[in-house]
Image (cartoon, helix red, strand yellow):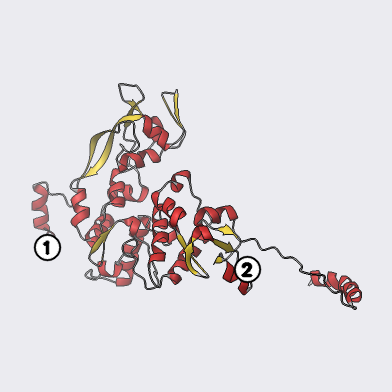
Amino acid sequence: IREYIDGGNEELVEFLRLFGVSELPRMTVENYSEYTGYSSDGCSDYIRTLFSKLSYPVTLDNTDVFRNLEEFCRQINHVELQRTEIDLLEKILDNSSTTSIIQWIQADNSLQNHLYTGYENSSLSVHVIWGDRRTARPLASIGRPYSYIHHMFMTRPWVQVNGKRYSLSDCVIGLDSHGIDVSDYLVEPAIADYIRDIDGAKGKIKKEFQGVFEKLQVKRSIADLPISKIYEILNYLPTVEGSEEFARSVYNEIVNRSDLELSEADCECEEYKKYMQDGKILTNNGFQPASESYYLDGKDVCDKIAKTYNLISIPKKRSRTRIKQLFGVEHLVLIGTIVGTPIIHPENSWFTLDFRQFRFLAFTY
């Protein structure tokens, strides 16, 4: 249809409208139910994400208190809710070009509300059955429920790069991999390809497309990605020849993100546990097991120490506990000792007195 109406054939557009053809994919509010079976694994990704948006601890019926997401999921047996859906959304995301999808987002204000906020437009109801209850009760503390449409756009692979499709969590704006192939894990959206056949000022159009990706929370730094993705990259780097420069860049991005703190759930993800068990990190002796490596906060050491220990360089002084948690390396403590008996110089007393007299001038300067 686009082929016939892009030329401005208004009569054809009006004719199609008479037969109920919508200009944009239709949104409808649908009832949805899911049995979770008192199990976190029984929850679909969407329901688990919806529950993760709750502010814990959660109280139901003013009696039952659930301290965290895992505890809540283990007690829930059935979920009933209303959610906004889009006709054939899965097929659209799986088959349409990235250019068409971006243009659809730009043209559809209702879709933008879902994608840019992450929540439903109104307080649609969510009911749950938990414990030994037999009837569903409203989940009053949820406020605006998490948007199913947003979830689909976040998780389906609709971003095309070099003939393959990626999800938004695989994308980094301005990604510089220093010449190594990381396309199995990360890509930069190919905006120049998306806008090639669009008429108009390319600079302006590129900025608009990039703005859509930014509003969809595509990150500009690897350190801003999900923890599982970060450690997937850290586990991959030692297996690639010539990845040293990219590895240093990744380490610096992680260290320089001051608010990067790992939660209990983060530490339970498979990628993190694999790294802590078998991971390697770039040191002065190449990639070495993290458990056998140490870090110095920007200090220079003699060749003997450098040859004895696997050292990574952290650019600024950081919390030792944080560096240990992020990279699995210990801080190397250097202790200076005097070997033998020092010989006191004949002029030592004069020098000490002279230094004390002029010391205040040094502090003033």
Determine the secondary structure under disc 1: helix
Please name whichever residue, 132 or 301, is drawn nearer the observer in this view of the structure: 301
Which residue is outermost to the front? 340
Determine the secondary structure under disc 2: loop
Cβ–Cβ below 8 Å for labels 1 and 2?
Answer: no
Tell me what residue is drawn at x 74 percent, y 65 percent.
337
Q: Position of residue 12 (x, y in %)?
A: 8, 56
Q: Position of residue 218 (x, y in %)?
A: 37, 58
Q: Amino acid at mark 2?
A: Lys
Q: Does residue 195 sit above or below 322 in this rendering?
A: below
Q: CA distance from mark 1 to mark 2?
A: 65 Å
Left or right for 288, reference 7: right
Q: Amino acid at mark 1?
A: Glu
Q: Does residue 11 sit above or below 241 in this rendering?
A: above
Please name whichever residue, 110 or 102, is drawn nearer the observer in this view of the structure: 102
Left or right for 362, reference 19: right
Which disc, if any, is residue 299?
2
In the rendered image, the quadrant that contains the C terminus is bottom right
The reply to whether residue 42 is visible in this rendering is: yes
Q: Position of residue 34 (x, y in %)?
A: 26, 34
Q: Position of residue 57 (x, y in %)?
A: 47, 33
Q: Residues within 10 Å of mark 2 (few under 14, many from 20)?
A: few
- Locate residue 347: give its quadrant: bottom right
Tell me what residue is drawn at x 62 percent, y 72 percent.
304
Please name whichever residue, 208 or 298, is drawn nearer the observer in this view of the structure: 298
Tell me what residue is drawn at x 35 percent, y 37 percent.
40
The reply to whether residue 25 is visible in this rendering is: no
Which disc, if any, is residue 93?
none
Which disc, if any, is residue 3?
1
Which of discs 1 and 2 lies nearer the camera? The answer is 2
N-terminal label among 1 and 2: 1
